Amino acid sequence: MAILQLILAMIIWGTLGLFVLKSGLGSIDIAFFRCFIGALILAVYCGCQGLFSKQYLKRETSIPIVCGGIFIVLNWILLFESFKYASITLGNVSYYMQPVFLLFLARFFFNETISIVKGFFILVTITGVLLTIDLSSQTIAINYSELYGVLCALLAGFFYSLATIIAKKIKNVSAPMMTFMQLLVGMIILLPLASLNTLHFSWNILFYIVILGVIHTVLAFILYYQAVTQLPTDKIAVISYVDPIAAIYTDVLFFNRILNATQIIGIILTFLGSYFVINPGSIGKCYRKFAQLGAKK
């Protein structure tokens, strides 16, 4: 169940670039409205469920949650900047070097080890993502504007990894309550920075803001936090690659991007690598089945 929740969250986040670009708003403004709408909805929900408690005011609980909220806000702003200055595709492949950051951070904070088999299939997954993005010489011949976008995406990935590590260290806090507190922190930080006085709303902009706030923030973060507290870091790292694959399909469906043979091979490698990292025991089963087929022939 936790794996399915994480996959669904990644698919939702894979469409993030589409709604960010369609909204036409600045990165800080989008981040603020995500925090505002999400915090408002979750405040009502947490109140109705009786989730508010004095334990969240304790230092050992509140400090990690506040730090996680700061990292998430920085992650959002930098990622939105990367979409605008680079592209959804280039921003995503740079951003999703974050599982590498995540694995190193997990090794530092939790002393988690990576087996040779899992390490191999993690490399297979990374190779698949790179092939899916199709980093040809023409693609990586970037200008300074795109370079800025790539750097923003890399930093966003680093802050995302820090937020994930913190989420794994927070115990006995429900996913809705954790999400509410972090969004509240983000809203307070971004309020003086958002250009609310100069914004001109339309029904079109309002639609994208509501979707970003309700679906990409409230729903996705609840699914994500419920999953990461139950899964080891290596599985989180690999399943995270579903996000850039979903982003590629967003490009195909809404921006008429055509996938070539290299990208199709990349998608296959990504899903194979992810499957065997999550289910390393399946390697032996697959080998025995192929051996049996060979013996019959």
Image: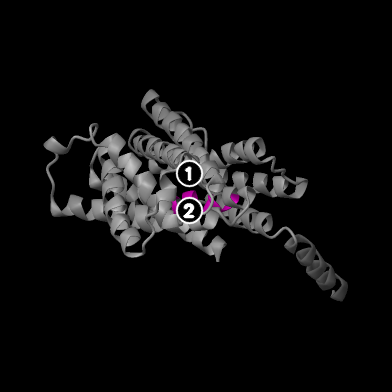
Residue shown at 34% from the left, 40% from the top: 185
Q: Quadrant of residue 50?
A: bottom left
The numbered disc on residue 95 is none
Which residue is label 2 attached to? 173
Residue shown at 47% from the left, 36% from the top: 159
Indicate yes or no whether the magenta region holds residue 244.
Answer: yes
Dot 2 amino acid type = Val
Whole-number angstrom distance, CA of label 2 to CA of label 1? 8 Å
First-in-chain label (2 vs 1): 1
Q: Quadrant of residue 3?
A: bottom right
Which one is nearer the viewer's eye here, 50 or 11? 50
In the image, is 205 to the left or to the right of 61?
left
Helix, strand or loop at mark 2: loop
Task: Tell me the magenta residue range.
Answer: 238-247
What is the total number of numbered labels drawn onto the structure image?
Answer: 2
Give the class, few, some or many, for how many residues have Cα within 10 Å of label 1's Cα (few <14, many ≥20): some
Task: Give percent across and percent down for residue 204.
Answer: 18, 53
Residue shown at 65% from the left, 57% from the top: 278
Residue farthest to the right? 295
Task: Give percent across and percent down for residue 31.
Answer: 31, 42
Helix, strand or loop at mark 1: helix
Residue farthest to the bottom? 296
Residue 255 in view (yes/no)? yes
Pick the quarter of the image with the N terminus: bottom right
Residue shown at 29% from the left, 44% from the top: 21
Which residue is label 1 attached to? 61
Indicate yes or no whether the magenta region holds residue 126.
Answer: no
Q: Is residue 159 above or below residue 169?
A: above
